[in-house]
Amino acid sequence: MASTQSAPKVMMPKAMTQQLLKAKFAELKENRQVSSMIDIIEDLIKATSNYFGVTIIAAQKRIAEFGVEEARGAFNYIDGPMYQLIHGSRGSLALTKHFQ
């Protein structure tokens, strides 16, 4: 495994990251109206990034590895500007694919 692929796993251990996501999800759900994960995914990614001191992209990819598909539709930048969250049906994209 290349170091670029293993670094996020070392810096964001599975059990600790899942525990953080569960706690942060509960906190966000308590403090605002949440109808789906897409409503708070960017906040979860930012919280994970800040907590572990990794980039937003590394946190986004690690969360997607846990099966949170909504993470792959967050923080989409195309030629500078950020575009709104994109979400297709569950299982519509492989982990290495993206919407175009």
Image: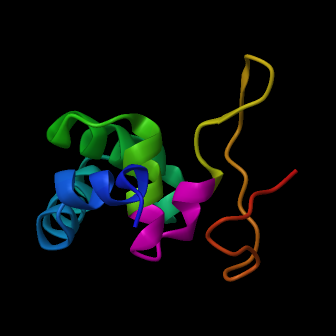
* Residue 65, horizontal then vertical, whole percent: 44, 70
5 left or right of 75 in image: left
Can you say which quadrant of the picture contains the N terminus? Answer: bottom left
**Image coordinates for residue 7, horizontal then vertical, percent:** 29, 52
Secondary structure character of the magenta stretch overall: helix
Q: Is residue 40 visible?
A: no
Which residue is at 27% across, 61% downward?
Answer: 9
- Of 53 and 71, nearer the camera is 53
Q: Is residue 38 left or right of residue 67?
A: right
**What's the residue at 41%, 37% (across, down)?**
56
- Say which quarter of the image contains residue 89: bottom right
Query: What is the tally of numbered marks visible in this picture?
Result: 0
Q: Is residue 54 left or right of residue 15?
A: right
Hey, which residue is sitting farthest bottom in the picture? 91
Query: Would you say residue 42 sits in the magenta stretch?
Result: no
In the image, what residue occupies the spot 42% across and 58% down?
A: 2
Q: Is residue 12 above or below residue 36?
A: above
Furthest-front residue in view? 2
Colour basis: rainbow
Residue depicted at 16% across the width and 40% down the height: 51
Residue 2 vs residue 48: left or right? right
Q: Residue furthest right?
A: 100
Q: Is residue 44 visible?
A: yes
Q: Is 92 above or below relative to 31?
A: below
Q: Quadrant of residue 15?
A: bottom left
Magenta residue span = 63-72
Q: Position of residue 17 (x, y in %)?
A: 20, 62
x and y, in percent, of residue 74 in the image: 59, 46
Up-down relation of residue 65 to residue 72 (above or below): below
